[in-house]
C-alpha cells in the first residue's frame, strides 16, 4: 500500500505510457463530479480503453483542451472556485491524454496534481480540507491499480 | 447637464496636462496610428483609428484651452460634448483599445496616444461610462485586494498544494528577504504552477524571497479603468507591505499591465520614489543567468516562438531578457515578424479581457497574432503574461490552431539542472 508521495511518484515512474494513462484516468474519475462539462466524461471513456487508437486519443485530447479553454477563470472576472474545480478536472484530463514524455513529472503525476488542485478549489468554497483526502484516495487508487 | 457628465467634463479638463495639449495641437491627422492599431487593421472600421477614439477629449481641449475654440464656444458655434456622445465613445475607449501603445510608436510627431487614452479613461470613469466588468474588478480590488476576489485563504491553499507538489516550502511574510514576489490573480487561479516554478528556480539560484500575505496582488484595475486615486491606493498597499517586510526588491510576475503599474506608474501615482527596486521576473531570471546562478540542462527541440507582452516589451523595454532565457532551453527559436517593441498585442490587454462586451472584438483582433503565427508556424508559443496566455489560448482554439502556449518562467523551471 502506497502511503506517501515519494512512493506514489516512484510507482508512477515505473509505469509505461499506457499504464500511466489508465492510472491517470482513475484519478480523474475520482473527481469527475466536480466538472459539469460532458466532453471530459466522454474523453475519459476513450482514455480508459486500453486498446484505444492513437487517433481516438488525439481527438479526445483535442476535445478536453477545448473544454479547458472554455472553463478557465476570466481575467478580472469574479473568481468562482467551484467552477475552478471543474477547470482543474479538465486540466487533469489533458494530462491523462497527453503522450508520455511531454509533461514534467509524467502524465499520471500531472493528472494527480490537477485532481488534487480540483479538490483544493472545492475546499476553498467549502472550507473542508478535501485536498488532503484526495491525496490519500489517490494512494489507494494507485495501489489498487498496481495490484489489479 | 447631469451631475455625472459635469464630473466627467471636469475630469477631462483636469487630465489635459501639457503633454496632452501639445499632442493635440501637433496632430497632423496623417492616420498612421490607424495602421498600427490591431482593432483597425483586423476590422477595417475607421472609428477604431486611435486618435479618433480621443475625439471628445480633443473637443474639450479645443473649447477650453485654445483661443479659437474658446471664442467659438462663447458665441455658441462649438458642439458641446454630451452624455450620449460619451456613452457612444465608451466602447471605443475601453473595448477597442488595449493600451498597447503601438500607435504611440508610429506617430510621426511623437504623440503618446496610449497616454492620452489613459487620461481620457479618467474622464470616462468619472462620467460613469466605464464597462461593468472593469467596475466589478476595480471594486473587488479595493474591497478584497484582488480584482478576481482571491482572498488570502485561497492563496494559502494554492501555496499548500504547490509545496506538496514541489516538495519545498514557499516563504510567506519573511521579513528581511531580498525579494518580495507579487502574483496576479490569474496565476493564483489558473496557473498556480507558476508559484512552484519560481520557488524551484529561486531555491537553485539561492535567492532570498517571500510573498506578502498583506499585498500579494500585482495587478492594478485602477489604471485600467482610469481612476488614479484607486490606482494609487493599490500601489500603496504594495509599498506598505514591501516596507514592512524590509525587502530590497519587489518582483512583478508574468503579467504585463502589473509591471507597467508597479514599475512605471507607481511612484508617480503615490507621489514619491520607492525605497526598493521593482524588477520583472524575466529581468531577474536573466540577471541570475548572467551571474551564473541559473543553470539549465537539455533543450527543447520543437520550434518555439515568443509573444512579447506589450507592457513588458514596448513599455518596459524587457526585450532581450526573454530571448536570452529562451535560448538557454530552446534549440529552434524563431522570431515572428514585428516583435520586441513593435510587437502586435494579443488583443486582450488594458482591461479588454475583463470586459465581456468586448469578446467578439477581442477575438477579431487576435487575427493579427494569427497572421504572425502563420508566418513562422511554431510548435509552441512562449509568453510571459497570464492574460496574454489565456487570450492566446482562446484565439488559437477559435482558429483551430493546435499550438500549446507556455509560460517562460515555467519552461525555464522544467530545465533546471538536477542536483
Image: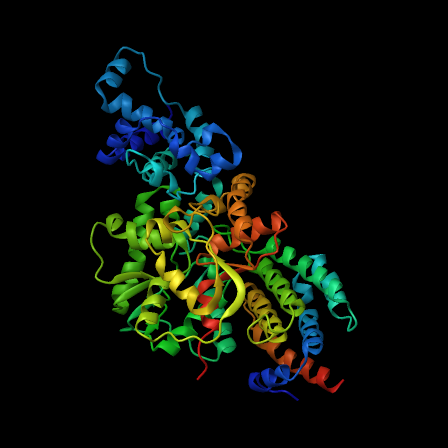
Return the residue nearer the eye: A136 or B188. B188
| Residue B114 shows in this picture | no
The percent coordinates of residue A38 (x first, y second) are 72, 57
- Colour logic: rainbow
Q: Residue at x 73, y 68 (%)?
A: A47
The quarter of the image holding the C terminus of chain B is bottom left
Q: Is residue A134 above or below residue B89?
A: below
The percent coordinates of residue B338 (x first, y second) are 43, 47
| Residue B371 shows in this picture | yes
Q: Residue at x 61, y 70 (%)?
A: A115
Q: Quadrant of residue B245?
A: bottom left
The percent coordinates of residue A97 (x first, y second) are 67, 67
Q: Is residue A143 above or below residue B91?
A: below
The percent coordinates of residue B202 (x first, y second) are 38, 74
Q: Residue at x 60, y 55 (%)?
A: A69
Return the residue nearer the eye: A43 or B328. B328
Amino acid at each position: 500500500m502506497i502511503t506517501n508521495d515519494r512512493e506514489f511518484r516512484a510507482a508512477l515512474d515505473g509505469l509505461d505510457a499506457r499504464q500511466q494513462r489508465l492510472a491517470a484516468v482513475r484519478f480523474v474519475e475520482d473527481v469527475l463530479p466536480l466538472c459539469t462539462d460532458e466532453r471530459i466524461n466522454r474523453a475519459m471513456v476513450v482514455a480508459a480503453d486500453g486498446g484505444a487508437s492513437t487517433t481516438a486519443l488525439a481527438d479526445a485530447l483535442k476535445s478536453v483542451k477545448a473544454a479547458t479553454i472554455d472553463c478557465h477563470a476570466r481575467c478580472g472576472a469574479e473568481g468562482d472556485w467551484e467552477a475552478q474545480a471543474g477547470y482543474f478536472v479538465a486540466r487533469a484530463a489533458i494530462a491523462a491524454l497527453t503522450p508520455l514524455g511531454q509533461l514534467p513529472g509524467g502524465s499520471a503525476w500531472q493528472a494527480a496534481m490537477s485532481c488534487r488542485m480540483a479538490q483544493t478549489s472545492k475546499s476553498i468554497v467549502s472550507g473542508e480540507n478535501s485536498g488532503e483526502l484526495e491525496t490519500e484516495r489517490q494512494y489507494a487508487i494507485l495501489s489498487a491499480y498496481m495490484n489489479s | 447637464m447631469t451631475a455625472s457628465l459635469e464630473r466627467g467634463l471636469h475630469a477631462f479638463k483636469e487630465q489635459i496636462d501639457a503633454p496632452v495639449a501639445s499632442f493635440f495641437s501637433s496632430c497632423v491627422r496623417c492616420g498612421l496610428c490607424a495602421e498600427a492599431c490591431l482593432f483597425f487593421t483586423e476590422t477595417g472600421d475607421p472609428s477604431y483609428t486611435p486618435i479618433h477614439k480621443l475625439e471628445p477629449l480633443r473637443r474639450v481641449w479645443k473649447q477650453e484651452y485654445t483661443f479659437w475654440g474658446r471664442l467659438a464656444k462663447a458665441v455658441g458655434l462649438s458642439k458641446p460634448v454630451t452624455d450620449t456622445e460619451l456613452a457612444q465613445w465608451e466602447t471605443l475607449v475601453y473595448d477597442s483599445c488595449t493600451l498597447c501603445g503601438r500607435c504611440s510608436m508610429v506617430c510621426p510627431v511623437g504623440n503618446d496616444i496610449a497616454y492620452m487614452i489613459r487620461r481620457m479613461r479618467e474622464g470616462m470613469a468619472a462620467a460613469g461610462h466605464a464597462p461593468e466588468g472593469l467596475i466589478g474588478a476595480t471594486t473587488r480590488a479595493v474591497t478584497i485586494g484582488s480584482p478576481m476576489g482571491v482572498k488570502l485563504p485561497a492563496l494559502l491553499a494554492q501555496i499548500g498544494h504547490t509545496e506538496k507538489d514541489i516538495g519545498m516550502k514557499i516563504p510567506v511574510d519573511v521579513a528581511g528577504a531580498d525579494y518580495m514576489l507579487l502574483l496576479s490573480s490569474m496565476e493564483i487561479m489558473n496557473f498556480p504552477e507558476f508559484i512552484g516554478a519560481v520557488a524551484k528556480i529561486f531555491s537553485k539560484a539561492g535567492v532570498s524571497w517571500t510573498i506578502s500575505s498583506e499585498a500579494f496582488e500585482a495587478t492594478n484595475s485602477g489604471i485600467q479603468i482610469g481612476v488614479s486615486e484607486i490606482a494609487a491606493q493599490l500601489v500603496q498597499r504594495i509599498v506598505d507591505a514591501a516596507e514592512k517586510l524590509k525587502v530590497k526588491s519587489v518582483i512583478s510576475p508574468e503579467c504585463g499591465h502589473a509591471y507597467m503599474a508597479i514599475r512605471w506608474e507607481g511612484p508617480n501615482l503615490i507621489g514619491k520614489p520607492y525605497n526598493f527596486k521593482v524588477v520583472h521576473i524575466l529581468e531577474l531570471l536573466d540577471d541570475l543567468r548572467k551571474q551564473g546562478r541559473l543553470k539549465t540542462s537539455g533543450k527543447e527541440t520543437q520550434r518555439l516562438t515568443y509573444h512579447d507582452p506589450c507592457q513588458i516589451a514596448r513599455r518596459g523595454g524587457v526585450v532581450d531578457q526573454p530571448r536570452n532565457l529562451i535560448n538557454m532551453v530552446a534549440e529552434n527559436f524563431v522570431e515572428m515578424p514585428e516583435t520586441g517593441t513593435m510587437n502586435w498585442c494579443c488583443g486582450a490587454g488594458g482591461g479588454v479581457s475583463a470586459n465581456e462586451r468586448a469578446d467578439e472584438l477581442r477575438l477579431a483582433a487576435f487575427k493579427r497574432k494569427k497572421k504572425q503565427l502563420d508566418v513562422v508556424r511554431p510548435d509552441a508559443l512562449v509568453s510571459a503574461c497570464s492574460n496574454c496566455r489565456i487570450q492566446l489560448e482562446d484565439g488559437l482554439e477559435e482558429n483551430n490552431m493546435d499550438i500549446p502556449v507556455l509560460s517562460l518562467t515555467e519552461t525555464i523551471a522544467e530545465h533546471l539542472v538536477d542536483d
